[in-house]
Amino acid sequence: MELILEKSLQCTNHHTFDLSRQGYVNVLSHGLKTKYDKQMFESRRSLYKSGVFQPLVDQIGGRIIREHESTREPLRILDAGCGEGSHLFAIREKIVQSSPHELLAVGADIAKEGIYLASRDYPDMIWCVADIANCPFASQQFHFILAILSPSNYAECQRMLKDDGMVIKVIPESGYLQELRAIFYEQSDKQLYANDNTVARFTEAFELVESERLKYSWKLEKALVEPLIRMTPLSWGCTEEDLQKAKDMDISEITIDLRILYGKKK
Ligand SMILES: C[S@@+](CC[C@H](N)C(=O)[O-])C[C@H]1O[C@@H](n2cnc3c(N)ncnc32)[C@H](O)[C@@H]1O
């Protein structure tokens, strides 16, 4: 699908997909129910507003600015599995503040609830309900494809990425949200997150340009403890008792421990 920032998108077969009133397009042929629901996306949004992911935004935004500096082309970024859109919005804000490039930012997610929130609150971007395994976008048109804490389909990334483009994948490191893991996975090896397989799969698909770890602690206001618990798949499968225990624990600090993988086509 060619991207035109108007009221509709047109595919190469000349089918037109209208943008909804909120400004998103849905290209899934049938509705899909996922475990990522409205409450989870709203909880992620609440956490996001506290600034907890700003160091990640600075890191990714800064890297994109530097990588794209020497070209004159308008910049095109896809966030594949963008959820409620806050990462992409914040990265876009950072880029437009300091880069002269025209920028088209596109967020895609299979969960309509996430895309609805993104398009409601973040204008001037394209938001799309779509499956990352079967993306509706034309080949070789993105300079950067982001996958932040979301699954990836590397064949589709390869197809959509420009030859000199870059995939930026963010995965949890062993200490990510360790305070919650300690409560939910007491006595279990799931207390530490292992991502060796994910890194291996990434390096099979792309040339690993760099791998960097971003680790910090974040002070958590009391009001954000419940959204923290609700925003993460870690709480899926937990009993209400576990959830209550986590709420009662008075978590005052949370560990953000992420790995950022930067890859290029081989
Ligand atoms: C843990 S959330 C991360 C969302 C967002 N990147 C963030 O960090 O806030 C994982 C996301 O991947 C999306 N997702 C999972 N499978 C997908 C697929 N096949 N196509 C598109 N999105 C998918 C989910 O709907 C969810 O929004």
Image (cartoon, helix red, strand yellow):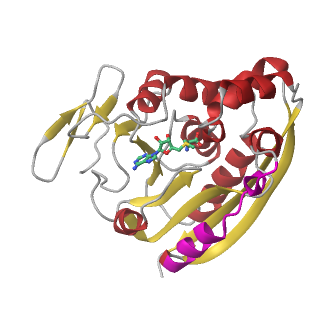
Task: Tell me the quarter of the picture where residue 173 sits.
Answer: bottom right
Is residue 12 visible to us here? yes
Residue at 57% across, 28% down = 40
Q: Is residue 220 left or right of residue 157?
A: right
Q: Position of residue 79 (x, y in %)?
A: 48, 48
Decide whether residue 188 is among the magenta residues.
yes
Q: What kind of secondary structure does the magenta stretch mostly adopt?
A: helix
Q: Nearer the viewer, residue 12 or 74?
A: 12
Q: Is residue 67 left or right of residue 35?
A: right
Residue at 34% across, 48% down = 131
Residue at 49% across, 34% down = 36
Residue at 56% across, 77% down = 203
Q: Residue furthest bottom?
A: 266
Decide whether residue 65 is among the magenta residues.
no
Image mark count: 0
Q: Position of residue 235 (x, y in %)?
A: 65, 36
Is residue 47 visible to us here? no
Q: Which residues are magenta?
A: 187-204
Q: Nearer the viewer, residue 249 or 205?
A: 249
Task: Tell me the quarter of the picture where residue 29 sits.
Answer: top left
Q: Position of residue 231 (x, y in %)?
A: 63, 32
Q: Position of residue 257 (x, y in %)?
A: 78, 52
Q: Is residue 233 above or below residue 149?
A: above
Task: Tell me the quarter of the picture where residue 41 sits.
Answer: top right
